[in-house]
Image (cartoon, rainbow, N blue to C red):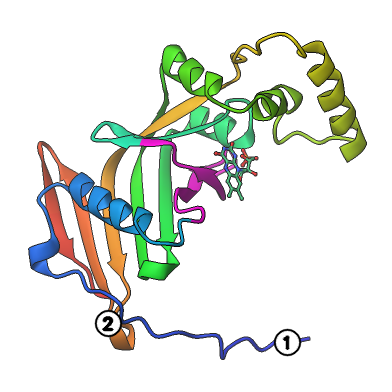
Amino acid sequence: MLRDISNLRKSYSKNSLTEEDIPKDPFLLFDIWFKEVSSSTNKSEINAMTLSTISPSGYPNARIVLLKYYSYEGFVFFTNYKSDKGVSIDKNNKVSISFFWEDFERQVIINGTASKTSKAFSTKYFNSRPKGSKIGAIVSENQSSKINSKDDIIEKFNHISKEYLNKEIQRPDYWGGYIIKPIKYEFWQGGENRLHDRIRYTRDKNFWKIERLSP
Ligand SMILES: Cc1cc2nc3c(=O)[nH]c(=O)nc-3n(C[C@H](O)[C@H](O)[C@H](O)COP(=O)(O)O)c2cc1C
């Protein structure tokens, strides 16, 4: 059966990205865009980003994770180091992250290398999480591995909740952050008649090479 969804289309016209809007450093543009998106009324999941990694078998894998910190140093998310993504990053730390901010008709794609954040940094963030999320991290020690049933997981959650009723939960070693240090950014601003603005920054020794790409 062919489900025809070809009429799902939309025109883009809200903004443009002209040469005057382009700072020398892409981090500044990311920061401007993120602040603009953050100031809008709809802030739902604006820090959700698609993280793509290369699996040991050579296939790319993409999934959503949440950006928790960003700075000139890089972009930070937290996860289980034993998960599929953790295993992939161990073997090949070249990754890509991308954001889609629908209300602003914007996309940002960043390529870079991922490395673990310091233990102290991971612990500080872990300690700030709600208790339920901390327990979730313990319950899902083997994130991405096969489980027998959802009931098993709920039972484990209840058991650990009781065990830690009056105790603090320490960050497990297998859980922490990654920081992605960018080597390339692409900023995409939707335009009329599909004439989108695409600006690419590529790290070149100590400066960023800036190029406009065909939409
Ligand atoms: C909105 C959203 C936010 C998510 N945030 C995270 C996150 O910050 N860290 C994380 O490990 N998984 C997060 N996930 C779950 C991942 O997409 C994924 O299912 C999980 O990390 C296992 O991925 P892997 O098997 O490829 O390692 C999120 C999923 C969604 C839909």
Callout 2 secondary element: loop
Residue interval drawn in magenta: 44-69
* Residue 59 appears in the picture as rendered: no
Q: Earlier in the sequence, mark 1 or mark 2?
A: 1
Residue plotted at (22% across, 73% down): 16
Callout 1 secondary element: loop
The residue lying toward the viewer, choosing from 74 and 146, is 74
Q: Which residue is mark 1?
A: 2
Query: In the rendered view of the protein, which quadrant contains the C terminus?
Result: bottom left
Query: x and y percent of residue 117 in the render?
Result: 41, 22
Amino acid type at image mark 1: Leu
In the rendered image, residue 59 lying in the magenta stretch gets the answer yes
Name above or below for residue 14 compared with residue 192.
Answer: above
Residue plotted at (60% across, 19% down): 174
Query: x and y percent of residue 39 in the render?
Result: 34, 56
Name above or below for residue 19 compared with residue 88.
Answer: below
- Mark 1 and mark 2 residues within 8 Å of each other at the beta carbon: no
* Residue 112 appears in the picture as rendered: yes
Residue plotted at (57% across, 49% down): 63
- CB at mark 2 closer than 8 A to ligand 1? no
Q: Quadrant of residue 129?
A: top right
Query: x and y percent of residue 109 in the render?
Result: 36, 54
Q: Quadrant of residue 158?
A: top right
The residue lying toward the viewer, choosing from 130 and 5, is 130
Residue plotted at (47% across, 50% down): 49
Q: Which residue is mark 2?
A: 195
Name above or below for residue 13 compared with residue 153.
Answer: below
In-image side of 83 versus 189 (left or right):
right
* Mark-to-mark CA distance, 1 and 2: 30 Å
Circle on res. 137 = none
